[in-house]
Amino acid sequence: MDFSDATARFTILAFSGLLIAAAASDWKHFRVPNRYSLALLALYPSYVIASGGNVEWMGGLIYGAVAFGVGFLLFTLRLCGGGDVKLFAAVTLWAGPTWFMAMLFYTAVAGGIMAGGLWLNHRFKRTTVPANLLYASRDLKASKQPMPYAVAIAVGGLFVALQLLARV
């Protein structure tokens, strides 16, 4: 292993650590500080240079910019948080066109599992009779409860990190 491979591996591991830190922050405080997304952006050029031209960086920039634009639209419609948008765009940059669809799939599945778990948790807290567990009521609290979506984004990002590590 030469110096560039070691640098590429280090940046991928740092990418993974930042994702875990962002997910932990969102889980605990329902907030993703900008420092995590900015650090992911700052690490990317180091990874591109260390990979020796094996990275489709222009496609990554385009996908990341589009993800940020779509996320900004969703943020203005109050459908997601700003920290989640920035984190998702940074992870999309790393995924690029090669791993974007798989990253999106794993993020969506993890988000769905987390949403189901939060819904069940809310339902168990509300009812004492098991028969009422699946009763569909118009409980606005259940539909408006916060969800730490950076956890799901981190799952998709960690999939990307594993794929990148396998290629180095």
Image (spheres, rainbow, N blue to C red):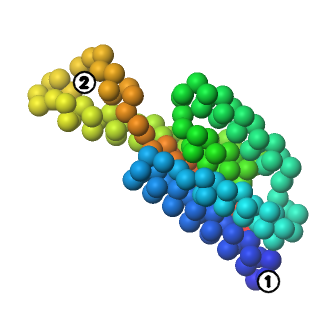
User: Amino acid type of disc 2?
Assistant: Leu
The residue at the far bottom in this view is 2
Is residue 108 depicted above or below 17 in this figure?
Answer: above
Task: Determine whether label 1 and label 2 are within 8 Å by CB.
Answer: no
Query: Mark number for residue 2?
Result: 1
Query: Horizontal placement of 46 versus 35: left or right?
Result: right
Is residue 114 depicted above or below 95 in this figure?
Answer: above
Rounded to the nearest angstrom, the CA distance separating label 1 from label 2 is 57 Å
Query: Mark number for residue 20?
Result: none
User: Amino acid type of disc 1?
Assistant: Asp
Query: Which of 78 and 96 lies nearest the eye of the viewer?
Result: 78
Q: Which residue is mark 2?
A: 134
- Which residue is pictured at 79% across the width and 83% down the height? 2
Examine the image and state in which quarter residue 121 appears: top left
Query: Horizontal placement of 141 versus 22: left or right?
Result: left
Is residue 98 in view? no
Query: Which of 87 and 128 lies nearest the eye of the viewer?
Result: 87
- Which residue is pictured at 11% across the width and 31% down the height? 128
- Name the secondary structure under disc 2: loop
Query: Which of 86 and 154 lies nearest the eye of the viewer?
Result: 86
Q: Quadrant of the C terminus?
A: bottom right
- Which residue is pictured at 65% across the width and 35% down the height? 71
